[in-house]
C-alpha cells in the first residue's frame, strides 16, 4: 500500500520518547529484511483489558497512522490508535539487566484492572 494513503500522526496523538526511539532504531539496524517500520498493535487481555505489542512490518495500510521518527516509522492501525491517543511509548532500562518498552498515560479500558496498567504512571503491559 502506498504511504500517501496513510494518516500522519501528530505528537499530540502519540509520542515516542528519545530512549524509545534510540532503542527502536538500534533494533531496526539489526534486521536484515527490508521493513517500513515498527507496528504497534493491541490485543484483548491483560489487566487493563488490552495488551500492546510491537513488531517489525513491511507494510503500511490505508487505515494506518504513521509517526515519522528519526530514520524509521511507528505505524498504528486506527483500531489500536483509539487506545493509544495521548500515550507516550518509552524505553526503561532498570540498570539490573532488565529493560522494556512501557506505555505511559494509558486510559483505562473497562473493569477495575490491576492498578498499574492504564495509569498515568505508565504500565509495562506489553
Image (spheres, rainbow, N blue to C red):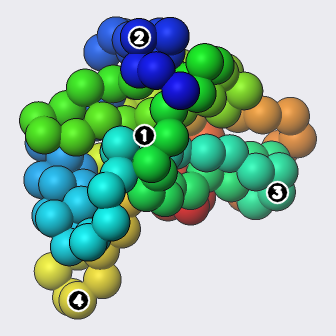
Q: Quadrant of the C terminus?
A: bottom right
Q: Do labels 3 and 4 touch, CB within 8 Å? A: no
The numbered mark, 3 or 1, whose residue comes first in the sequence reads 3
Residue under label 1: 104
Q: Nearer the viewer, mark 3 or mark 1?
A: 3
Q: Earlier in the sequence, mark 2 or mark 1?
A: 2
**Residue 93 in the image, given as x and y percentages of width and height:** 21, 70
* Distance between the alpha carbons at the discs numbered 1 and 4: 21 Å
| CB under 8 Å between discs 2 and 4 | no
Residue at the spot of label 3: 45
Q: Which mark is residue 77?
A: none
- Return the disc, 3 or 4, that comes first in the chain's sequence: 3
Tell me: 125 left or right of 69. right
SS at mark 2 in the image: helix
Q: Earlier in the sequence, mark 1 or mark 4?
A: 4
Instruction: Give the Cα distance between marks 3 and 4.
Output: 27 Å
Q: Compared to 94, does 2 lie above or below? A: above
Q: For residue 97, which numbered disc appears in the image? A: 4
> What residue is at 19 percent from the left and 46 percent from the top?
21
Pointer 4 local density, CA inside 10 Å: few below 14, some 14–19, many at least 20: few
Which is nearer the eye, 14 or 28?
Answer: 28
Q: Position of residue 71 (x, y in %)?
A: 13, 40
Q: Mark 2 — residue? A: 4
| SS at badge 4 | loop
Mark whose residue sits in front, 3 or 2: 2
The answer for how far apart the CA atoms under marks 2 and 1 are is: 29 Å
Residue at the spot x=82%, y=57% of the render?
45
Amino acid at each position: 500500500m502506498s504511504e500517501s494513503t496513510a494518516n500522519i500522526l501528530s505528537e499530540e496523538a502519540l509520542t515516542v520518547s528519545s530512549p524509545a526511539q534510540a532503542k527502536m532504531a538500534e533494533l531496526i539496524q539489526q534486521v536484515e529484511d527490508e521493513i517500513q517500520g515498527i507496528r504497534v498493535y493491541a490485543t484483548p487481555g491483560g489487566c487493563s483489558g488490552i495488551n500492546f505489542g510491537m513488531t517489525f512490518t513491511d507494510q503500511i495500510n490505508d487505515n494506518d497512522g504513521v509517526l515519522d521518527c528519526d530514520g524509521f516509522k511507528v505505524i498504528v492501525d486506527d483500531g489500536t490508535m483509539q487506545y493509544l491517543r495521548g500515550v507516550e511509548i518509552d524505553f526503561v532500562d532498570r540498570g539490573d539487566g532488565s529493560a522494556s518498552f512501557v506505555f505511559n498515560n494509558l486510559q483505562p479500558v473497562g473493569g477495575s484492572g490491576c492498578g498499574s496498567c492504564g495509569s498515568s504512571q505508565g504500565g509495562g503491559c506489553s
